[in-house]
Image: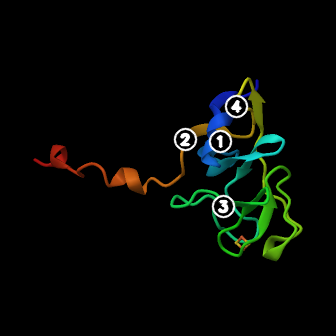
Amino acid sequence: MTNRHRLTSVETVEDDGAWLFTVRDQHDMNQEVILVPCEDGVTAWVNNCTHEPQRLYRDDIGVVMRDGGIVCPKHGSIFDACSGDCGNGPAAETTLLSVGITVEDGSVYLTDDAVDFLWEGGNSSDDDDDSGPSSTTHLTF
Ligand code: FES
């Protein structure tokens, strides 16, 4: 059976320049994935540079695109947004890890059996931890 989870609309990806979400992979690890617009439509890539463990999407600036490519914020290698291929800089001759999606009627669906959708946004749970009081009063006698 194929996983099929509606992620967002093509329009949102085009307007925002990128759309970040988190999946659980086959090794039970959480992975961030980015949707980016390209001339063929929308593509999905694991949010990691192939050169070093560096996120391509950053919370402060999102994904930097140049000439139809995703720019790595660390050393500047550029990955083609349609193919994921890199032809320059320290990540040259590598390709981003793709995630299976389907575009239908203006919506983007996750259709990759190897992963399960977890949530929209990144994998950091630090923000959530700050929000509530850390009371343990129910454990005291
Ligand atoms: S970490 Fe991306 S090019 Fe070096």
Image quarter for residue 116? top right
Amino acid type indicated by mark 2: Glu
Residue nearest the observer in this picture, 91 or 31 = 91
Q: Which quadrant contains ligand 1? A: bottom right
Image x and y of residue 107, in percent: 69, 28
**Circle nearer the N terminus (2, 3):** 3
Q: Which mark is drawn over residue 64?
A: 3
| Residue 29 in view here | no
Is the shortest distance between ligand 1 and the CB of mark 4 under 8 Å?
A: no
Q: Is residue 111 left or right of residue 62?
A: right
Q: Which-is-in-front pick, marks 1 and 2? A: 1
Picture coordinates of residue 58, whole percent (x, y): 57, 60
Residue drawn at (55%, 60%) of the image: 61
Dots 3 and 4: beta carbons under 8 Å? no
* Real-space CA distance between mark 3 and mark 4, rounded to the nearest whole angstrom: 23 Å
Task: Report the residue at 72% width, 72% height from top.
Answer: 76
Residue type indicated by callout 1? Val
Residue receiving disc 1:
13
Residues at marks 1 and 2, CA–CA distance in whole angstroms: 13 Å
Residue at the spot x=70%, y=31% of the render? 109
* x, y percent for residue 129: 35, 53
> Gap between marks 1 and 3, in whole Å?
13 Å
Q: Is residue 41 visible?
A: yes
Q: For numbered disc 3, what is the local secondary structure?
A: loop
Q: Pointer 4: what residue? A: 109
Q: Relative to 57, is 82 above or below? A: above
Q: Which residue is mark 2?
A: 120
